[in-house]
Image (cartoon, helix red, strand yellow):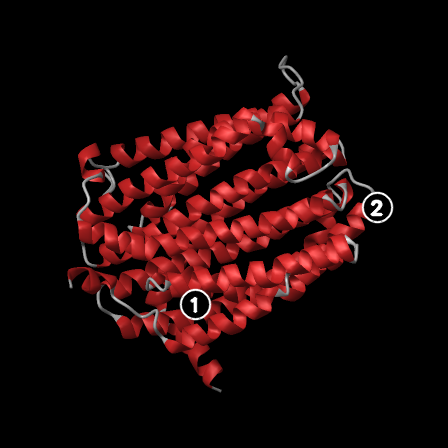
């Protein structure tokens, strides 16, 4: 009865719903646009064969780990920026932006340099297939040049969300995604007089789109007189107290995303040794899953910003109520997403040029994903949105990394390399980590130690 009462109250709270939709919808739309590009990329590249799908999928795992590192930086930055925005401290928000950009750019170089110096050695980490190594290396050496631009763009976009500017990134993403798709079509297949570049053409298209996106984000920020538009000096010059608060809040988030990303990349190290068909199946399944995951990216972003704003303004009771509202929304959206994923899976699988066996493995991977969705999406909202919003980042680090390294990775090695089970069985074994994370994460949520005003702590 209490659940029904809370659900009714949430649906009647127009102020909360308006705030949640205003932030969640644009974030979800932007994620959906990026997913559509990945989907079309995979479909176009898929016409070149399953080895090419596997090669590009594995090469993009380098970007995946890098993007999670950046996500960790900006997630920590958003926690602080949202609370500063709640207290009206624009000056500190600009310094958060400057420090986050600096860290993200340094991180991008750590992935760019090895990808340029010896891309084949990087690819050999993931697979022993000579064909996949060769194709993946040529793709990676070009795609890696986009990493610094991605670092700057993602930092600006995240902090823009913290100050309520959520529509502009969606419009810019729409433009750059259109550019990416058109260039993919031209350069992969050699249309309109362009050379037929195959997988490398997809990398060139991605690089071009990322450069345009970065330039557009910065231009709009300064032309629109955004709170983030400032002189270079305002982005730097940090007090000891500020650096301490940034380190305490952001370092665990950065470590969290990096260690989680490294761990999930090890999954693909195992998948890569299960054969090109296994990698192709899990790559396609993951791309389809992203269609529904973007909904929860939007909700978690909204939770982090809205709860952070409320706690920064000292409204802890309201933040607690809003957190419960987000879990109710998450459950409702999960049910719809499960039905959507189940209903469209064969329609999307049918768009790929793959063998019936690979298609069936994709289908079974998706069914495993659907079964785990209730706990997986709870973890998404709880860890990325609720717990982090109050700076409870060290516990988030423990929950995420212990789940991956103590459960997920052992399951991958046992299922894939020791028992030699099919990819869908291994994937289901790996996903068992979500149950552990849901139990531990719920206990932490109920302890309410995440309900904190970080501005008060900084002033002390």
Bin the neighbour count of mark 1 within 10 Å (Cα to Cα): few under 14, some 14-19, many 20 and up.
Answer: many
> Residue shown at 39%/58% (left/top)?
302
Res. 275 image quadrant: top right
Using residue 227 as the reference point, say whether residue 167 is left or right of it: right
Q: Tell me residue 55's x, y (percent).
A: 68, 34
Closer-to-camera residue (186/323): 323
Residue 411 seen in the current view: yes
Residue on which disc 2 sits: 356
Disc with the residue nearer the chain's start (2 vs 1): 1
Q: CA distance from mark 2 to mark 1?
A: 40 Å
Bin the neighbour count of mark 2 within 10 Å (Cα to Cα): few under 14, some 14-19, many 20 and up.
Answer: few
Q: Tell me residue 240's x, y (percent).
A: 18, 50
Residue on which disc 1 sits: 326
Using residue 81 as the reference point, say whether residue 410 is left or right of it: right
Q: Tell me residue 365's x, y (percent).
A: 71, 55
Closer-to-camera residue (71/90): 71
Residue 342 seen in the current view: no
> Residue shown at 65%/31% (left/top)?
136
Using residue 279 as the reference point, say whether residue 460 is left or right of it: left
Q: Secondary structure at mark 1?
A: helix
The C terminus sits in image quarter: bottom left
């Amino acid at each position: 009865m209490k659940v029904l009462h809370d659900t009714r109250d949430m649906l009647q709270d127009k102020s909360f719903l308006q705030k949640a939709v205003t932030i969640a919808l644009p974030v979800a739309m932007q994620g959906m646009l990026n997913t559509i590009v990945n989907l079309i990329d995979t479909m176009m590249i898929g016409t070149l064969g399953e080895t090419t799908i596997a090669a590009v999928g594995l090469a993009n795992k380098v970007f995946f780990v890098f993007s999670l590192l950046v996500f960790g930086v900006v997630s920590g930055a958003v926690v602080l920026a949202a609370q500063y925005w709640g207290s009206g401290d624009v000056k500190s928000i600009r310094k958060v932006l400057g420090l986050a950009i600096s860290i993200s750019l340094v991180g991008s170089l750590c992935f760019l340099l090895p990808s340029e110096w010896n891309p084949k050695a990087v690819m050999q980490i993931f697979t022993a297939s000579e064909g996949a190594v060769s194709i993946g290396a040529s793709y990676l050496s070009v795609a890696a040049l986009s990493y610094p631009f991605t670092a700057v763009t993602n930092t600006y976009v995240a902090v823009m969300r913290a100050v309520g500017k959520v529509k502009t990134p969606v419009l810019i993403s729409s433009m750059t995604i259109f550019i990416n798709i058109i260039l993919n079509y031209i350069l992969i297949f050699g249309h309109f007089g362009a050379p037929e570049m195959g997988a490398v053409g997809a990398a060139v298209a991605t690089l071009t789109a990322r450069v345009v996106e970065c330039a557009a984000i910065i231009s709009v920020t300064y032309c629109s007189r955004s709170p983030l538009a400032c002189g270079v000096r305002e982005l730097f010059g940090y007090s000891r107290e500020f650096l301490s608060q940034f380190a305490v809040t952001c370092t665990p988030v950065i470590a969290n995303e990096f260690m989680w990303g490294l761990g999930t990349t090890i999954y693909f190290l195992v998948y890569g040794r299960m054969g090109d068909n296994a990698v192709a199946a899990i790559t396609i399944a993951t791309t389809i899953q992203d269609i529904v995951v973007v909904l929860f990216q939007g909700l978690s972003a909204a939770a982090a910003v809205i709860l952070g704003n409320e706690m920064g303004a000292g409204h802890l009771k309201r933040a607690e109520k809003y957190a419960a509202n987000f879990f109710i929304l998450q459950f409702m959206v999960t049910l719809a997403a499960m039905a959507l994923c189940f209903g469209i899976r064969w329609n999307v699988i049918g768009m790929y040029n793959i063998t019936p066996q690979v298609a069936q493995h994709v289908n079974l991977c998706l069914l495993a994903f659907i079964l785990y969705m209730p706990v997986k999406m709870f973890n998404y909202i709880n860890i990325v949105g609720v717990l982090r919003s109050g700076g409870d980042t060290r516990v988030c680090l423990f929950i995420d990394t212990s789940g991956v390294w103590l459960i997920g990775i052992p399951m991958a090695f046992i299922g894939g390399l020791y028992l030699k089970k099919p990819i869908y069985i291994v994937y289901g074994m790996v996903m068992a980590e979500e149950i552990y994370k849901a139990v531990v994460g719920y206990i932490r949520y109920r302890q309410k130690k995440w309900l904190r005003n970080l501005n008060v702590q900084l002033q002390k």
